[in-house]
């Protein structure tokens, strides 16, 4: 577990809000349910830093990794609904978890109050630089020659990386065995060492891995190429059609959080998304900001849940 505190030191000009009286009058905790270094962590720490400046209260980042994000999400679901414990996560803990699991320790819909849809990012198809392929079609041909000897990794069953790979298998007809890890960074290490055939990772962290020279990015799942890597084609450009949505990054409070607090946080975070620093970060990481109302975020969660359930059913992934 890693903790880090951000204080409001002139990062943004705070605007007074009166939705929730004196809220906040003490530090807020951002629970990030994945390890440090991944996409959720990158954006979580940046958002925490700017929200602290806006609200003029410290925001403490608390990484509670494990079980594909379920451990951290459970912590927030069971926390007091007072606006001082928030979850910043991806669709892995909500839409994907709802599509895959029947025994979750929380109800993704009833146990949380959606605050804001921060945005969405594409995923990248990655292979080791040592693998004798240079394009996604070459990877498909290589994997078909190997039959059932292929493997792919992810940060756990039900994560976006896992289902993106299952979707890739369905779309191309290749075979591969899933190897779940406790974190994407561990899977990337095995990929670079040649112990995995491929994996999917968010473009946020994938770009950093590629710059090491040990990992190659063959394609991205978004609708357009990455500004930072314009030579990498989209999956659609190489003829691979996908089922799954791009997902989302969002922030939730525990159910029962006062409506005024939810609205205050939503207003603050919508302004945070407009800050020059956050706009630059989103552009750098090829992530599209969304923002909007809590209701719009709730609709997004419900829509993505339906789409992920379709992927799970088609891939014959057993429900847990």
Image (tube, rainbow, N blue to C red):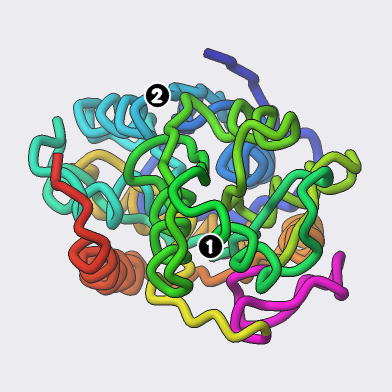
Which residue reaches farthest top?
1
User: Residue 56, can we see it?
Assistant: no
The residue sitting at 9% across, 43% down in the picture is 102
Location of residue 241 in the rendering, given as x and y in whole percent from the top left corner? 49, 82
| 68 within the magenta span | no
Asked whether disc 2 touches disc 1, contact meaning CB atoms under 8 Å apart, the reply is: no
Marks 2 and 1, Cα distance to the nearest angstrom?
33 Å
Does 256 appear above or below 284? above
Location of residue 152 in the rendering, given as x and y in whole percent from the top left corner? 52, 44
Is 265 left, or right, of 196 in this rendering?
left
Q: How many marks?
A: 2
Asked which secondary structure carries label 1, the reply is: helix
The magenta-colored residue range is 219-237
Label 2: few (<14), some or many (≥20) within 10 Å?
A: some
User: Residue 71, can we see it?
Assistant: yes
Location of residue 240 in the rendering, given as x and y in whole percent from the top left corner? 54, 80
The residue sitting at 57% across, 30% down in the picture is 59
The front one of 198 and 95 is: 198
Is 306 left, or right, of 145 in this rendering?
left
Q: Which residue is mark 1?
A: 144
Asked which secondary structure carries label 2, the reply is: loop
The residue sitting at 38% across, 69% down in the picture is 170
Residue 306 falls in image quadrant: bottom left
The residue sitting at 36% across, 28% down in the picture is 72
Quarter that holds the C terminus: top left
| 236 within the magenta span | yes
Q: Which residue is mark 2?
A: 66
Q: Main secondary structure of the magenta part?
A: loop
The label number, if any, that marks residue 40 in the structure image: none
Return the disc, 2 or 1, that comes first in the chain's sequence.
2
């Amino acid at each position: 577990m890693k903790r880090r505190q951000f204080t409001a030191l002139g990062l943004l000009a705070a605007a007074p809000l009166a939705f929730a009286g004196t809220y906040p009058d003490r530090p807020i905790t951002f629970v990030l349910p994945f390890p440090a270094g991944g996409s959720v962590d990158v954006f979580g720490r940046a958002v925490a830093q700017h929200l602290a400046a806006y609200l003029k209260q410290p925001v403490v980042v608390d990484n509670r990794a494990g079980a594909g994000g379920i451990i951290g999400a459970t912590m927030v679901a069971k926390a007091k609904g007072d606006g001082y414990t928030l979850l910043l996560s991806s669709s892995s803990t909500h839409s994907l978890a709802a599509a895959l699991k029947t025994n979750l320790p929380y109800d993704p819909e009833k146990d949380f109050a959606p605050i804001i849809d921060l945005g969405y990012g594409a995923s990248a198809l990655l292979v080791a630089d040592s693998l004798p392929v240079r394009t996604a079609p070459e990877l498909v041909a290589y994997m078909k020659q190997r039959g059932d000897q292929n493997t792919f990794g992810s940060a756990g069953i039900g994560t976006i990386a896992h289902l993106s790979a299952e979707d890739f298998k369905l779309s191309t007809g290749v075979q591969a065995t899933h190897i779940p890890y406790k974190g994407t960074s561990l899977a990337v290490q095995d990929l670079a060492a040649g112990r995995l055939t491929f994996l999917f990772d968010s473009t946020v962290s994938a770009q950093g891995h590629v710059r090491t020279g040990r990992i190659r990015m063959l394609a991205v799942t978004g609708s357009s190429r990455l500004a930072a890597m314009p030579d990498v084609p989209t999956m659609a450009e190489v003829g691979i059609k996908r089922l799954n949505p791009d997902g989302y990054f969002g922030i939730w409070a525990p159910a029962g959080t006062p409506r005024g607090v939810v609205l205050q946080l939503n207003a603050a975070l919508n302004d945070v998304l407009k800050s020059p620093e956050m706009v630059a970060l989103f552009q750098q990481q090829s992530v599209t900001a969304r923002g909007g109302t809590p209701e719009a975020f709730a609709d997004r969660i419900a829509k993505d849940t339906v789409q992920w359930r379709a992927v799970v059913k088609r891939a014959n992934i057993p429900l847990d």
